[in-house]
Amino acid sequence: MSILSEKAMKTLGEEAYAEKPVGSGAFTVKEWRRGDRVILAKNPDFWEAPSVSLDGVEWISVPDDNTRMLMVQKGELDAAIYVPFSRVENLKKNPDLVVHLDPSTREDHLLLNHEHGALAKPEVRQALDMAIDKKSLVEAATFGLGTVANSYIPKGALYHYADNLQRPYDPVKAKQMLADAGASDLKLNYVVNAGNEVDEQIAVMLQQQLAKVGVTTTLQKVDPSQSWDMLIAGDYDISVMYWTNDILDPDQKTTFVLGHDTNNNYMTRYKNEKVKELVAAARVEMDPKKREQMYIDLQKMAKADVNWIDLYYSPYISVSRKNIEHFGQNPLGRFTLEETVKK
C-alpha cells in the first residue's frame, strides 16, 4: 500500500496532485511530459536514501515494440519492458543485454462486450470459447513461455482454482451452438493495439480460428491510448487485454472484473446479481476455508457465464543492458528501482 500525503492532496487538489504527487518512495516526480515520459528524481527524504544508487530515472513511453527493442540494443535505453515473446531468444544471444523472466500475476484474456447483440447470450459466448484453440495459440504467440489460462485468478495467486473448467477446442460443436443460438452469421469488430507484436499476432490467429465456425471478424488497429478509451466507451465487440494484480488478495481483481458496476466489470458489461452478491460476501468473510470456497465458486460461475475468455498466463519479460544490476519486477509488477544500480 502506497503512503500518500493527506495535506498535499487537500492543498493541491486531486488533479494537481496527480500531475506532481507527493509520496514516500525513493523517487519524486520532477516532470511529467504527457505521452512522452515521466522524469523522476532521487528523494532525499526517503528513509533509505543513502542506499539508493540512482540519482534519477526517466520512464519513457515507446509503444512500438520494434522501436523499443532497437533502442535498448543500441544503448539508447538502459532497460525496456514488455519484450515480445518472439524476441527473447535473440536478445539472450546479445552479450550486452540481460533478459529477465520474472514470475507474474499477469493473465491475458479476450474481452467480450455483453451489450452487443448476440454476445449477450451465454451460449454464444460459450461457443466462442470452444472455437478458440488456446493451446496452439499460446504455443505460437508466446513461443512456449506462456501457459493456457483457466481462470481470471492467475496461477500461483491466492485461491486460484486449478480444477476450474477448461472448455475443449471443438469448432464443430461451437458452430452448431452458434446456429442453435441464431448467430450463425455472427460479425464482430475486434479492436487491436497497433504496434503490439503479440496483440497483432493473436488477433490474426483468432480471426482465422473464428472464421472456421462462421464468425466474421474485422480487425480494427488503433493506437493503444485510443483502444483503452474505446473499451471504456463500449465501442468494440471483442478485444484482447491483460490484468496484473496490484495486491495479493483476490478481492481487488474480483471486484473490478465481476462485482463492480461503475467500471462495467472491466469493460465487458457483464452482469450477474448472484455473482455480485457473492463478491461482496467474500470480501468480508473472515473464515479462510469459507472464503476460499467462495472464490472457487466465483471462478466456476465466471467460467459458466463466460464473463470473458481466459487465454494465457505469462511471466514479466524485460531486458536491460549488462551494466544495469538488480532490475526486475515482483509478481505484482512493481519495480524496485531503489535497489537498481547502473555501473
Image: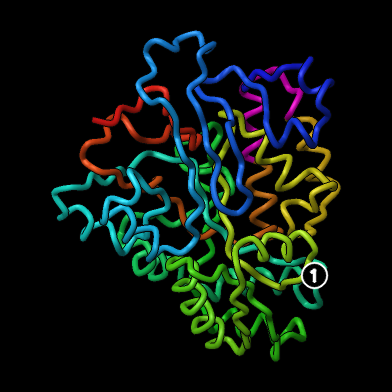
At a point 77% along the width and 86% down the height, the residue shown is: 182
Magenta range: 283-296
| Residue at x 30%, y 59% (from the top left corner) | 144
Q: Is residue 266 left or right of residue 155?
A: right
- Is the magenta region chiefly helix, strand or loop? helix
The image shows residue 51 at horizontal and vertical percentages of: 37, 13
In this rendering, would 74 be left or right of 22? Answer: left
Q: Residue at x 55, y 41 (%)?
A: 38
* The magenta stretch spans residue 289: yes
Give the left or right position of residue 70, taking residue 151 as reference.
left
Judging depth in this view, the residue of 87 and 339 nearest the camera is 339
Residue 5 locus on image (x, y percent): 72, 17
Front residue of this view, candidates 6 and 304: 6
> Is 241 placed above or below 49 here?
below
Instruction: Report the quarter where the N terminus lies.
Output: top right
Residue at numbered disc 1: 120
